[in-house]
Amino acid sequence: MLAVERAAYLTIDDGPADDFLDKVDYLNAKGIRAIWFCLGEALERFAEEAMHAIKTGHVIGNRSYDNADFSAMSLADVRLQLERSDRIIDKLYADAETARPSKVFRYPYVQDETDGAHFTAIQHLLEGLGYRQPSFENIRAVEPSGASLGQGIHVSCTQDTFDLGADGMLGAANYGNEIIQIHDWISLDPFKALVDKLIAKGVAFKLPKETDLPIQLV
């Protein structure tokens, strides 16, 4: 019986940070492309760096404008946060002369969301704004934590790199592919060490098929 290849989808939150460009180039050198769930206010400060990431095949997703706690906000204010970042991301893709492949979102402070109706309303809002769940393939089933109140359009993860030391993380017994979460506020050297440890686990990094676009720069 042929072995099934396991893949990891790399997702990185809360950037761009000061060393964002160095991290992008480090991943590029390893042949890895990621989905970066970015803050709109940081994208305004690091627009050139974000366009470089886009041109080299990375995906820019929405993490809100200023890392707002959506669980404590009205739907109207959530919409303002999403649309403000959306306009910034759209301009970055336009300036990079690249079609935005899809609109993806990771909920900030999802662990604080306890109102199921509020969470569901935000999912409907995201859908109306054109957001979709990426086509992640064969994702490993995880026990629900209750934090996210369900999957919806919000992109969750199956492994956080804080768990890399845990017994069995990405081990052979964990059948299925992984959505891995790193935070961009981690400084460059620990970031490299985390990526190297993931590579040593022997998984193949990939992007969802609809976001895997031709690379403009190498």
Image (cartoon, helix red, strand yellow):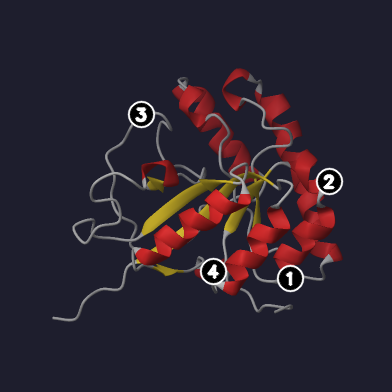
Question: Mark number for residue 80?
Answer: none
| Residue identified by numbered label 2 | 44
- Displayed quadrant of residue 79: top right
Disc 3: CA contacts within 10 A as few (<14), some (14-19) or many (>=20): few
Depicted 214 relative to depicted 121: above or below = below
Is residue 75 depicted above or below 3 in this figure?
A: above
Q: Position of residue 170 (x, y in %)?
A: 30, 56
In primary-sequence order, the first of circles 4 and 2 is: 4
User: Which is nearer the N-term, disc 1 or disc 4?
Assistant: 4
Q: Name the quarter where the C terminus is drawn.
A: bottom right
* Residue at x 45% of width, y 24% of height: 116
Q: Which label lies toward us, 1 or 3?
A: 1
Q: In the image, which is nearer the foreground, mark 1 or mark 4?
A: 4
* Number of dots carrying numbers: 4
Q: Earlier in the sequence, mark 1 or mark 2?
A: 2
Mark 1 or mark 3, which has the lower sequence index? Answer: 1
- Residue type pointed to by label 1: Lys
In the rendered structure, the answer to whether residue 162 lies left or right of residue 44 reads left
How far apart in space, not on screen, are marks 3 and 4 (Cα)?
A: 31 Å
- Discs 4/2, front: 4
Dividing the picture into quarters, in which one does residue 85 lie?
Answer: top right
Q: Nearer the viewer, residue 86 or 166?
A: 166
Q: Which mark is residue 32?
A: 4
Instruction: Report the amino acid beneath label 2.
Output: Glu
Read off the residue under disc 3. 146
User: Residue at the location (51% across, 66% down)?
Assistant: 207
Q: Which residue is mark 1?
A: 55
Q: Judging from the image, what secondary structure is the residue with disc 1 in?
A: helix
- Name the quarter where the N terminus is drawn: bottom left
Tell me residue 54's x, y (percent): 72, 65
Say which amino acid is labelled 4. Ile
Q: Is residue 175 left or right of residue 217?
A: left
